[in-house]
Image (cartoon, rainbow, N blue to C red):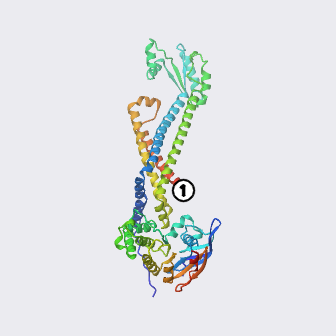
Amino acid sequence: MAGHIVKGRFPRRRLVQTVAANLVRRLFQGAARSWARNIASNAPALGSMTLLLVMSGLIGLTGFALHNLEQTEASQASLLHVYLRDDAAGGDVVSLMNRLSTDPRVSTVVYVTKADALQRAQHMPGLPELAQASDSNPFPASLDVQVKNIDDVAAIDASVRDDVTVDPVYPTSYDRGAYQRIQAVLFGAAIAGAAFLALLGFVAVMVTMNSIKIAIHSRRDEIAIMQLVGASRWMVRGPFVIEGAITGVLAGAVAGLITLGLTATGTSLASGTLTQFAPGISIAVGVVAAAIVVLVGLVLGSGSSLISLRRHMET
Amino acid sequence: MRSIVQFSAVSRLYGSRRALENVDLTLEPGELAFLVGPSGAGKTTLLKLINREIRPSSGEVWVAGFAAHQLKKSRVAQLRRRVGVVFQDYKLLPRLNAMENVAFGLQVGDLRISEDEARDRSLDALEAVGLGDRAGALPHQLSGGQQQRVAVARAVVAQPPLLIADEPTGNLDLETAWGIMDLFEDIAAWGTAVLVATHNVEIVTRLQRRVLTLVDGRLVRDQPAGQTGRMAWLATS
C-alpha cells in the first residue's frame, strides 16, 4: 500500500515573526554595529552631510520666505493707489470711481479718505514721524484700485493720471518695472541657492560614498563568504544601505534640530523684523522644515550607499 | 536519476588563455570524486563554474537542476544554497565562534530559520564533524584541522546535494587530512555528491574513489572508483 506523506505546516505567524526577527538582526542590528565600529570613517560623511542639511534647511526657509515676499509684492504691485487732489469735487470723484468700477480689468475700488490715509501711515515704518511733523494732514485721499491682472496696471494708470480729480504732481503709486526688478533679484537668489546646495550635495554624496567604500573594503571577507554561502544580493547589500541611511538620518536629525532652533530663536527674539523681511516663517514652518531635512538626509545617505555599492561591491 | 553536476562541452577562456577545453562530465548523488591535475590545469576554474563564480565561454553547466551557464545574477544565490563550499584557507569569520560561523552559513541563505533552530542545527553539524565541545571557540583558538572541520560543518549544515572542496587539506598535516577525508566519505554516504580538488596523491590513491584528471584544461582521464591508476600528471606538477 502506498504511503501517504503528511507535511507539517509551519505556523504562518511564527514564520513571519522569525523572518522579521532575522531581518532586524541581520540588517538593522548588523548595520548599526558596523556603523559604530567604523565611526572614524563615518565621521567625515556625517559632518559634511550635517553641514549640507543645515544649509539646505536654512536656504529652504529663506526660499519659503522669499516666495511669500514675492506673493506679497505681486499683490501690492497689482494694487494701484490713485491719489486725489485735496480740492477735487465730490461728484468728479464719484464719477471716476464709477468709471473704474465698471472697468472689466478692475477687481475692486475703495475710497480712502485723508483721515484713513493718516491712520494707515501711522502703522508704516518711518511715516508716523512724518505725520507728527506737520500740523495738517499731509496724506492725500486716494482710490485703491485692485487690478485683476498685474500686466494691466500700466494701462489703468494711463487712463486715470490725466483725470481732473487726480493729483497732477504725484498721480498714482505705479512704478514701472519695480515688480520685475524684485522678480529678477529673487530669481537670481534662487539660482545661487540651488547651485550652492548642488555643490554641497555633491561633496556630501562623494564623502558618504567613500565611507561606504571603506566599509565594504573592511568587510570584504565577510561579503565574499556571504556571497559564497548563498546570501541574496539584497541581504549582502542591505546592511550597507542601512549604514548610509543611519549616517543620513543622524545628520538630518542634527541639522533639523539646528534649523528648528534657529527658527524658534528668530521668531521669539525678532518677531517684528522676521514678519517684515521673512513673512510666513513660524515655529510650525520650522518643524516642517526640520522633518523635510531628516527625510532628505535619509534619502541622501541611503542613495549614496546604493551608488557606492553599485560601483564597489562587484569588484 | 538526474545528475547533480553535468558539464557538456564546457570551455572557459581567460583572455586568449584556455583554462578549460571541451570538458564533459557528470557527478551523481552520493558520489565522492577527486579532481586532480598539475597547477594551472583548470581545477579551480571547474569548481568556480559549478558555484557560478564564473560562466563558461561555451558549453552547458547544470548544477542541482540549475542551468549555471545562463543563470542570471539575481538567481545565483539560489544555486549557491544548493552547493556547499570548502576552501583551503577555511574562510571563517574571525569575530564569530564556531557555532556562529556554522549558523551564519545557514541563516544568511534562509531567513525563515529561527535563531533556536539555527543554533540546534549548527551544534548538530559541529557534533557530526567531532567538534561538539568547541562550539564556543573562536577560529584563532582552533587548530587548522579544527577550523577546516568547522568550515565543513558550515558547508553541509543546510544539507546541500553537492559539496565542492578546493584543496581542503592543503594547509593540514597528513593525519589531520585523513580526518577531513573521513568526513567527506561520511557526507557522501549521506547522499551528498562530493567533489574534492586536491594535490594529495596518497589520499587519492588509497581511497580508490573516482578520479578526474585535468591537464592543460582538458579532462584527460575519468577513472572509476575502485581502480588505481597512474598519476602521469605528477611529472608536470
Name which quarter of the figure residue B130 lies in.
bottom left
Spot the residue most to the right.
B16
As drawn, is A134 to the left or to the right of B135? Answer: right
Q: Residue at x 53, y 37 (%)?
A: A193
What is the chain letter for disc 1?
Answer: A
Q: Residue at x 39, y 35 (%)?
A: A265
Q: Amino acid at mark 1?
A: Arg
Query: The N terminus of chain B lies in which quarter of the figure?
Result: bottom right
Q: Is residue A29 above or below residue A150?
A: below
Where A143 sits versus B237, above or below?
above
Instruction: Between residue B232 and residue B193, name the one nearer to us.
Output: B232
Q: Position of residue B58 (x, y in %)?
A: 64, 70
Label 1 sits on residue: A310
Q: Position of residue B28 (x, y in %)?
A: 53, 80
Image quadrant assignment for residue B143: bottom left
- Residue B2, visible in the rendered structure: no
A303 vs A4: above or below: above
Looking at the figure, which quarter contains the C terminus of chain B?
bottom right
Please rate how many residues cluster around mark 1, counting C-alpha atoms within 10 Å: few if below 14, some from 14 to 19, many from 20. Answer: few
